[in-house]
Amino acid sequence: MRHCTTIALLFVVAVCGCGESTPDTLAESDYDEQEMDAAIARAQSAVDTFIAELSNPTGTDHAVKAPIADDGATEHFW
C-alpha cells in the first residue's frame, strides 16, 4: 500500500503547477460512479498482487489510477 501512496503523492506533486485551465481529457459526462467504486474495490483487493508484480515483473504494462480531490470534486488520473 505504501507504494501506491508514494505513486499518488508523486503524481500530485507533478500536477500542482499545471494551472487552472480545464484539460481536454476531463470526462464530464458518461461517468458511472458505481462502476468506478466497483473498480476501486477490485483494485484494492489486488494491491498485494500488484506490488508483487512490480517487485518481480512478468509483464510490460503496469498502470495506477489515482483519485485526486480538489474543491469538493474528485478526478481519477492514470
Image (tube, helix red, strand yellow):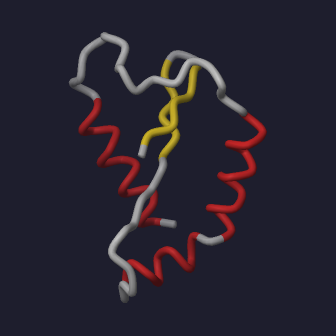
Q: How many marks?
A: 0
Instruction: Please tell me which residue is depicted at 56% across the width and 28% down the height of the picture.
Output: 74
Q: Is residue 22 left or right of residue 46?
A: left
60 above or below 57?
Answer: above
* Residue 64 on image: x %, y %: 45, 56
Judge from the rendering whether residue 22 lies leftward or rightward of residue 75; answer left or right: left
Drawn side of residue 23 relative to residue 50, left or right: left
Question: Which residue is depicted at the point 28% across and 28% down?
Answer: 16
Q: Residue at x 41, y 59 (%)?
A: 63
Residue at (41, 66) in percent of width and height = 3
Relative image position of residue 44 (x, y in whole percent): 64, 62
Seen as rendered, the residue at the extreme right is 34
Q: Which residue ends up furthest to the front in the rendered image?
A: 30
Compared to residue 47, the image places residue 43 above or below, namely: above
User: Taking 13 as reference, is 25 above or below it?
Assistant: above
Q: Position of residue 51 (x, y in %)?
A: 46, 76
